Image (cartoon, grey):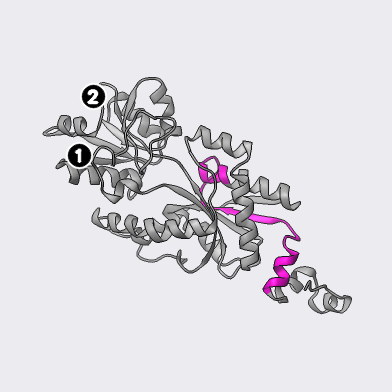
Amino acid sequence: MIVRATRRDLLRYGSLSALAAALPAPAIAQAWPAKPIKIVCTYPAGGLTDIFARAYGEYVAEKTGQPVIVENKAGAAGAIGAEIVKQSPADGYTLMFTNSTTMVQNKALFKKLPYDPDKDYALVAWFNTGHLPTMVNKDIPVKNVAEFAAWAQGKKVSLATYGIGSFAHIVTETLNRHCGLKMEAVHYRGESAMWQDVASGAVQGATGSYASGSAVLQAGSVKPIAVPTMVRMKKLPDVATFYEQGLTEKAFQIRGWVGCAAPAGTPPEVVQKLSALMVEAGKTERVQKINDTFAIDEGARDAAYFRQVLDQEGPVSIEVLKTLGIEPQ
């Protein structure tokens, strides 16, 4: 049954917004959306998290008829934006676009967080951010991981990463353990300078996004030797996965992702509607073009799939991070 506001109700509560807050969840869900929706992006403008927030937000706006406003609240590995969303009303009008660092890795990288990734949010949708290939300088005479490991034995070798505790850091240390190497992980702030140093030979290799490394790859300055997860990249079909090359550690199967969530307590019916809209958006031409640019082979997945990723892959990430000897901040 639809609950309708009477004149007396409006006078009592002062506004439709206040009335909505007083209505039971089913009534709120039926009326949603009745005003603009805000997306808090926990990372700066221009990155993939921000690009997804705006592309998917635009589709939600188109389908609901309500404006969708994206606000970038970056800092503290996503914690600043995550805290803002945690404290927002659970009414379906505030969403968060963030990534695996905010929702998973931060649990191992910080002693205390101003939010609880496991309790403070209702999951909405999951977005794959694509493979993160491992590539080495063109002058190194290797074609795969085994040849690279043999070449690196007894040499001073450095692999670049885009941050402490990042997937690139995990790859470097897991390769060291698997191959009996002592390669140094050199940490950069972002990928641009990292790939330039691989191309120049300042460092011997790196792991990172296809989009960020595509310029030096197309210039022939670097070459890929492996890709993570269990499935090969469509953009690099001839490059075998780590698993195919005999490196079966779960660390090489971890996926990078962006996630959309709402404050805990958001009506399930609203979450379901938002989740369905995100999945629909992932099939649009605009999002498919973005995915092609970033070598992402699939569109958005629903809230249930997001939960599955957190439950199955999250503990693996935490376990691997703890073996790196990183002192939580």
Secondary structure category for the residue under label 2: loop
Seen from the viewer's position, the closer of residues 185 and 323 is 323
Q: Left of 95 or right of it: where is 163?
A: left
> For the magenta stretch, what is the residue range?
25-52
Relative to residue 260, is residue 146 depicted above or below?
A: above
Identify the residue position indicated by label 2 in the image.
140
From the viewer's perspective, is the residue at label 2 or at label 1 nearer? 2
Residue drawn 68% across the image and 51% down it: 68
Q: Quadrant of residue 239?
A: top left
Q: Name above or below for residue 205 compared with residue 219.
A: below
Magenta stretch: residue 321 in it? no
Query: Do the CB atoms of the residues marked 2 and 1 lie less than 8 Å apart?
Result: no
Q: Position of residue 317 (x, y in %)?
A: 34, 55
Q: Position of residue 8 (x, y in %)?
A: 87, 79
Percent coordinates x, y for residue 111 in the rendering: 35, 65
Tell me: 248 left or right of 188: left
- Looking at the image, which is closer to me, 29 or 48? 29
Secondary element under disc 1, as helix, strand or loop, is loop
Q: Residues within 10 Å of mark 2 (few under 14, many from 20)?
A: some
What amino acid type should be assigned to the residue bearing mark 2? Ile
Q: Nearer the viewer, residue 244 or 150?
A: 244
Instruction: Assess disc 1: are there few (<14), some (14-19) or many (≥20) residues with their C-alpha within 10 Å of its C-alpha.
Output: many
Question: At 80% from the left edge and 70% from the top edge, which residue is drawn?
Answer: 15
Q: Quadrant of residue 194?
A: top left
Disc on res. 133: none
User: The residue under label 1 is which amino acid type?
Assistant: Met
Query: Which image quarter is the C terminus in?
Result: bottom left
**Residue under numbered circle 1:** 183
Marks 2 and 1, how far apart in space?
Answer: 15 Å
The percent coordinates of residue 128 (x first, y second) are: 48, 46
